[in-house]
Image: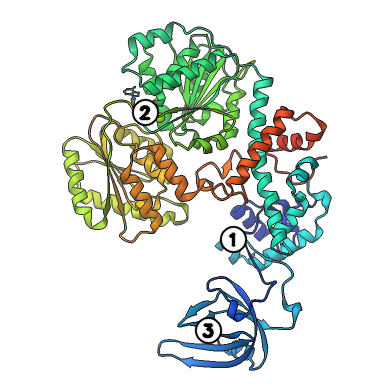
Amino acid sequence: MLLNEEVTYLKGVGPNKSRLLESELSVRSIGDLLHIFPFRYVDKTKITTIKDLDPSVHCQVVGTLIKKNRVRGQKQSYTTATIKDTSGFLELIWFRGGAWLDDLLVIDKQYLIYGKPQRFKGKMSISHPEMQPYLGEQSLSKVLEPVYSSTEKLKKSGFDGKVRKNAIRTIISRLKTDDIQENLPPYLTEKLQLISKYQALKWIHLPPDLASLQQAQKRIKFEEVFFFQLRMLFNKNYRRLKFRGIPIKALGKSFHKFFNEKLPFELTGAQKRVLKEIRQDLGSGAQMNRLLQGDVGSGKTMVGLMSMLMVLDSGLQCVMMAPTEILAQQHYKSISESVSGLGIKVAFLSGSVKGRTRADLLRHLEAGDLDILIGTHAVLEKPVKFHKLGLSIIDEQHRFGVVQRSRLWTKGNENPPHILVMTATPIPRTLAMTLYGDLDVSVIDELPPGRKEIITLHKYEKHRPQILEFMHQQIKEGRQIYVVYPLIEESEKLDLANLQQGYERLLDFFPRPDFQISIVHGRMKPADKDAEMKRFAEGKTQIMVATTVIEVGVNVPNATVMVIENTERFGLSQLHQLRGRVGRGGKQSYCLLLSSFKLSENSKARIKIMTNTNDGFKIAEEDLNLRGPGDIEGIQQSGGLEFRLFNASEDQDYLDTARSIASIVLKNDPLLESPDNAILNKYLHQLNKGFKDWGRIG
Ligand code: ADP
Ligand code: MG
């Protein structure tokens, strides 16, 4: 099967390049390579007359060379040439040149020129054009030329645009209809006027013209969103029709005892409403699959805990999974305290629980001697078996994928457990439907009373002395402070140096032993990180200098100041998450956004939104406006389904169409059992299995 062949077999791709292709682009097979689409196209099929040239749009011109000139400037020499066609004159400029250029430029000869024109003092010119003698129509390209994104390493290895294009040409010339598994039934392609998948794959790489390209794009975009929606709705049907939920009958002793005697505060209206929704799900006889959205600090943990109490009283177990060890430990601690005296056994599991302790824990869990298990991903591992699992809670969902969610399912015994996913990354409702179409959504849209708005200010480097002074004062009042630096992989070294520098500057200003400063970054061992986090959480250090590792969930109510360095390098939702680390106690809290003076419009807009509002939902909406949903974490790669072409911000129409078509298809055939839909059924199963075999299945 052509598509499953390794790329090594392609001409010009030896073991070296194929290793790079795998590490840089996750490309292993020919099919993988074929499924990375060009990000733009160069149109060299047409000729534009000089008078019709459009500044800043790449164009191709045919003209006669009438003048050339080598100019010796003071700093730099350059070459100019003038080209003429029937409509006007065009200036060409080279700042680098040499004998080859002199040889190329022959007066009175006709040339084919390609480049991006600009207008300068009323004259059209192109600098460093691509240029070759014009030999008539045969010089024109027959197809739009694809342009692929690449990486420095790949280019250096010799796998550049040209080699890539040739590889793709070879693949496509060998591609037979049979190599491509059609995944849409004829009744859909006809109705929607879509070309075949085979045709689309060919044309997306080498479109003969713009119209074909558009058809290819239409087909592929539709397919991407369609299966995204279809899978979600199908899975929902499947669960509803094939599984029964564990019915939770009346609320019991521990729930009531907790509610009457232990609940440390009055629930907010939103918490009550959401608990009612959950209670209804649990009692319905169907399996609950609910997404609980609530801004940072809105009190999701309490909702989670009380949901567990509802379930425990029916003699079932519960598990709560958090994305980091720290967060899991915090949940463990606060939940253990909350339920003390109720006769509920709570245990903690993470990778760091080992040996005898682990073995005992697993044994008790399976025997049903433990009621609540709280932990990290470790709870998903195979040996972790429950006696009777009734409810799985996933905190901070955006760190987990759909696949992990489904793994919690299989932990059920006869029936799958109820699932509650809690996320602090609010997303607008329409987007939530798209992303979590298989979940019902509950929203906590209210913060507990008495919260003070976090005061957010935008500051520049020149304000640093004042900021240090302010930090000093807060520490004197007994408060604690976060200082956060960005860290992105490409500039990891530089960023670490930055962080280190910032740390040292703080040490100068806040000397030991009067002050203690923690530092945490991604290069540290998890155990060291945790130790530092713990020192800070226990109030042993006053300042925590960190990269974004603290982003998710830590709860240190005594921390009142969040200083963010290089704010322009953070995304909005990240900033909002970071800010949510302060303002957790009763004291007035502050978020100081430091940035450089020169900012892009987009950075300015983000910072302004942050200083204007504390409302996570508003921020999510604004984020969506600024970036388009395509960039929102999760949507580009929702549960292993990648959108290669579909762009949620530009292609909203596709989303709507795909969603309505998917629901019509499933309305007529809820489990895709009719022969007409066999092709959809087969493809969905492959998707659900995380299939990566590009060929047809036998
Ligand atoms: P998040 O939704 O971000 O997970 P948490 O569950 O950590 O928020 O709650 C944040 C803080 O608010 C906790 O200290 C919690 O005890 C407190 N809290 C939760 N609900 C209420 C309430 N109804 N009234 C007062 N405080 C509350
Ligand atoms: Mg939380």
Amino acid beneath label 3: Ile
Q: Which residue is mark 3?
A: 93
Residue at 50% over, 7% down: 250
Residue at 62% over, 51% down: 645
Mark 2 near ligand 1 (CB under 8 Å)? Answer: no
What's the distance in space between the residues labelled 2 and 1, CA to CA?
A: 46 Å
**Within 10 Å of the Cα at label 1, are there few (<14), some (14-19), or many (20+) other Cα atoms?**
some
Amino acid beneath label 2: Glu
- In this orientation, which residue lies closer to the viewer: 29 or 272? 272
Whether residue 160 sits left or right of residue 301 in the image: it is right
- Check disc 2 and report its element: helix, strand or loop: loop
Estimate the x, y position of residue 116 in percent, counting from the top left. 56, 74
Mark 3 near ligand 1 (CB under 8 Å)? Answer: no
Q: Quadrant of residue 596?
A: bottom left
Is residue 411 among the parts visible in the rendering?
yes
Q: Quadrant of the C terminus?
A: top right
What's the distance in space between the residues labelled 1 and 3, CA to CA?
A: 28 Å
Q: Quadrant of residue 597?
A: bottom left
- In this orientation, which residue lies closer to the viewer: 363 or 567? 567
Residue at 52% over, 9% down: 315
Q: Which residue is mark 1?
A: 150
Q: Which residue is mark 2?
A: 446
Q: Earlier in the sequence, mark 3 or mark 2?
A: 3
> Can you tell me which quadrant of the image ligand 2 is in?
top left
Q: Which mark is residue 458?
A: none
**Within 10 Å of the Cα at label 2, are there few (<14), some (14-19), or many (20+) other Cα atoms?**
some
Estimate the x, y position of residue 463 in percent, counting from the top left. 22, 54
What's the distance in space between the residues labelled 3 and 2, CA to CA?
A: 62 Å
Q: Earlier in the sequence, mark 2 or mark 1?
A: 1
Estimate the x, y position of residue 333 in percent, counting from the top left. 37, 23
Amino acid beneath label 1: Ser
Q: Which is closer to the viewer, label 1 or label 3?
A: 3
